[in-house]
Image (cartoon, rainbow, N blue to C red):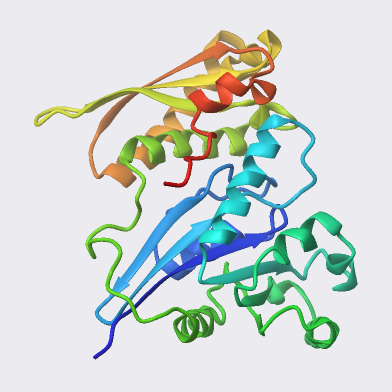
Amino acid sequence: MKHKAGYVSIIGKPNAGKSTLLNALLKQKISIVSDKPQTTRKTVLGILSEEDYQIIFLDTPGILNPKYLLQEKMEEFIKRSIDDADILLFIYDVSTEKEIKNLFGEKNLLRLLNQTSTPKVLLLNKVDLSSEEKVKKLIEEAEEHKLFTKIIPVSALLNFNTDSVRETILSYIPEHPKYYPEDITSSENERFFVGEIVREKIFELYRDEIPYSCETAVEEFKERESGKYYISVMIFVEKDSQKKIIIGKGGAQIKKLGELSRKDVEIFLDKEVYLELRVKVRENWRSNEAMMKQFGYAQPKDN
């Protein structure tokens, strides 16, 4: 039996359901999910390995018009993932968008989609929140533009039609040996995912601009054969006022953040942990090139 392997980039506007789709296709949680847009900041690589194929998924930040350096770096991740992909999955939220023509009116989005000849599949997501008539109309309108090679209605949250998405991917990716050992599900290490779990809980607990002004960095990760792991995570914010909000009165909020984060970290690591959270101010870090590199937003150069 011939073996297939290839890269799949999942792209779309903020909050369209990219991370939820990735988790559904992998049948486990890899990428953080929030009902707030722009949760994903970097490309998260998830790997699905079966006997006769291996699919490497690239979950990307939401496509928008960059307004500051961090968003410019996020767009660089999107561009690179598009260049690396054997197939693009463009996910479109039918529950919020009234007409597909709104999609084709966004120049920045179209520029990204048209930068490559890679096959593009349109996934009309959240069809469970829309009417059958509306979905049918969106499919007809999208077909007129001839930008996508296939259109699939899905519900990533309910796992509806995800098997069809997987079969479509397999029809496009080439014959190739496995790129990664079959026993790993991501190229990222445990420290990365611990930081992402804390950042996910920040999105859940805090409102307005706070989550977007935060970055996390795992400063210590001590594994112990007996006893709890010790993990120290620094939360970076841009202003003293934001630091006070994160900590809360008498430290109540950061204590709650720590409790919620620790539970998910323990599930992820399958190990009891002592999780320490601290907060540090780095003014305007989202517009600072040096800070971007420190937080891992600088793209590696091609060899």
Q: Position of residue 248 (x, y in %)?
A: 60, 15
Using the image as rendered, state which of residue 26 and residue 3 is in the foreground.
Answer: 3
Q: Does residue 161 lie above or below 110 as drawn?
A: below
Based on the displayed image, in which of its 4 quarters is residue 221 positioned?
A: top left
Give residue 79's position: percent from left, percent from top: 62, 53
Q: Quadrant of the N terminus?
A: bottom left
Q: Is residue 132 left or right of residue 274?
A: right
On the question of residue 223 being in view, the answer is: yes
Q: Is residue 297 left or right of residue 173?
A: right
Residue name at image x 51 percent, y 48 percent: 32
User: Which residue sits at x=66%, y=75%?
Assistant: 123
Would you say residue 99 is visible in this rendering? no
Q: Quadrant of residue 144?
A: bottom right
Q: Is residue 184 above or below residue 74?
A: below
Side of 273 where 264 appears, left or right: right
155 up-or-down from 295: above or below: below
- Judging depth in this view, the residue of 138 and 301 nearest the camera is 301
Q: Position of residue 3 (x, y in %)?
A: 29, 82
- What is the tally of numbered marks visible in this picture? 0
Rendered location of residue 292, percent (x, y): 57, 27
**Quarter-of-image position of residue 108:** bottom right
> Which residue occupies 78% across, 76% down?
130
**Extreme residue toward the front, this view:** 303
* Residue sitting farthest toward the left: 225
